[in-house]
Image (cartoon, rainbow, N blue to C red):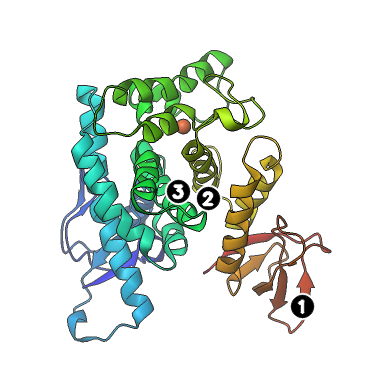
Amino acid sequence: MRLVFTRDLIPGMLTGGEVTDVAGAVKLLKQGICLTQSQITKLQNWGVPFLYLDDGTDYDRIKFSGVDMIKINFAKVYQEIMHDVGHMFRYIKKFREVPVMQMKALADHKISLLVETIGALDYLLEMRCHSEHTFQHSLNVAVIAGVLGKWCGYQGEKLKNLVLAGLLHDIGKVVIPLSILDKPGYLSSAEFAIIKQHTAEGYQLVKTSQQISQDVKLSILQHHERMDGSGYPAGLAGDEINDGAKVIAIADIYEAMTSDRVYRSKMTPFEALNIIADQMFVGLKPEICLTFFDNMRNYLTGSSVALSNGLEAKVIAFDAKEKHVTRPILYVQNGTCIDLQKEALRIVGVYG
Ligand SMILES: [Fe+2]
């Protein structure tokens, strides 16, 4: 058996086990099914990130490289957590009650494993072809917030709380009608007003819990507040906003931009960072943004990318003087170097 990303499937491959949707709630395919193109397309539309194939090979006997093993373990843990989070979000939707201890245990033990994995954000990009589901978006935000929090110096209980806040930040969406939440295209002002209620609704769900810290509660309530006072629900500004909420805000934007949505395809990390750079001196805390850029530029250096002119290239450096610039210098297949700050070309794909 081997683990294969859904985007790499080709017709004729055999499923090595039962395939379910990302939440583990719906059985999609049995073991031993010979995949057709139509089934592969459906799996991609369901947002199944990967599955096990039976290719007759005893993979236990094969030596994987260290990087392969880290990636495989990350994918396994991610899938386990996804099932758990899916169950928990359905429980919250049904009973309007948060299973606090289970969610804390998940954040403290399992999600922390993903946060501590070197290369977590690279692997995460591969896991989430689609994150239409609130619970999958929430898990991804928990991991991104944890990684960004570590880069900002969070540790111990403070870091665990930040990961939990990422996991819980959108729980208020369980009370928003799916017809509005999943609506493709633009929302009317009345519909947007209903969406905005998810922050206060989420806070209501946890506000009396003794096991959840005030930082986590405020992160849920304030993750759409903005430094210039333009956010919601209260229009708070600057220091009035909880520090964790400011980290979650950036992780939330980055996750949303780098995931496929009904109304648009996912952006590359470069495009997502550009959007964050545009908001850095307006709504987002500049210090956190700059820490994110610094570390992401290290992350992205060495990546293979596709350019808008059809050429492939490798990221070799970023302009060290301009910390918020996300247009790197590239080494192109044909042996030339391109400084994207001086060219109109765009990066349209990243291959790790
Ligand atoms: Fe939100």
Vertical comparison of 200 with 238: above or below: above
In the rendered image, which residue does mark 3 sit on?
Answer: 145
Judge from the rendering whether residue 71 lies leftward or rightward of residue 191; answer left or right: left
Distance between the alpha carbons at the discs numbered 3 and 1: 34 Å
Q: Amino acid at mark 3?
A: Ala
Tell how many labels.
3
* Residue 175 seen from this side: yes
Place of residue 319 in the rendered image (x, y in percent of width and height, measured from the top left): 75, 67
Query: Of helix, strand and loop, which one carries label 1?
Result: strand
Q: Kindly state the secondary structure of the residue where label 3 is placed.
A: helix
User: Pointers 2 and 1 in contact (CB under 8 A)?
Assistant: no
Q: Quadrant of the N terminus?
A: bottom left
Left or right, 3 with respect to 337, comes to left
Task: Give the residue pinned by disc 1.
Answer: 337
Residue drawn at (19%, 86%) of the image: 61
User: Which residue type does callout 1 highlight?
Assistant: Cys
Nearer the viewer's eye, disc 3 or disc 1? Answer: 3
Residue 112, compared with residue 339, is above or below; it is above
- In the rendered image, residue 249, in percent from the top left (x then y), is placed at 52, 39
**Tag shown at residue 258:** 2
Q: Earlier in the sequence, mark 3 or mark 2?
A: 3
In the image, is 191 to the left or to the right of 61?
right
Q: Mark 2: give few (<14), some (14-19) or many (20+) Cα within 10 Å.
A: many
Label 1: few (<14), some (14–19) or many (≥20) C-alpha neighbours in 10 Å = some
Q: Is residue 155 above or below residue 302?
A: above
**Which x, y percent locates residue 54?**
20, 71
Q: Quadrant of residue 178?
A: top left
